[in-house]
Image (cartoon, rainbow, N blue to C red):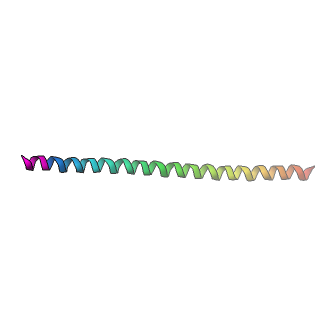
Amino acid sequence: MKKVFGLLMVATMVAFTACTKTAETAEEEATATVEEAAAAVDSAAAVLDSAAAATVDSVQAAN
């Protein structure tokens, strides 16, 4: 009976570890995806800021 209990205990620990690692991996992937999206948004914002500044400069030069 002790062997059966021991095997069940080990199986439970292995299953718990597998589930925990899977959740951590999914969380890490989600975080990386969010960081990539944030970088893309920052890049797009920089392009728009540059275009807006160029437009303002062009209008000011024309006047």
Q: Position of residue 30 (x, y in %)?
A: 46, 48
Compared across the picture, whether 3 is left or right of 44 comes to left
Q: Which residues are magenta?
A: 1-6
Q: Position of residue 23 (x, y in %)?
A: 36, 47
Please tell me which residue lies in front, 41 or 28. 28
The residue under the point 43% across, 51% down is: 28
Magenta segment main secondary structure: helix
Q: Position of residue 40 (x, y in %)?
A: 59, 51
- Residue at the outermost left position: 1
- Residue at the outermost front position: 2
Q: Is residue 9 magenta?
A: no
Compared across the picture, whether 26 is left or right of 7 comes to right
Compared across the picture, whether 14 is left or right of 5 comes to right
The residue under the point 39% across, 51% down is: 25
Q: Position of residue 46 (x, y in %)?
A: 69, 53
The residue under the point 53% across, 51% down is: 35
**Count of labels in the image:** 0
- Residue at the outermost right position: 63
Please tell me which residue lies in front, 31 or 58. 31
The residue under the point 15% across, 46% down is: 8
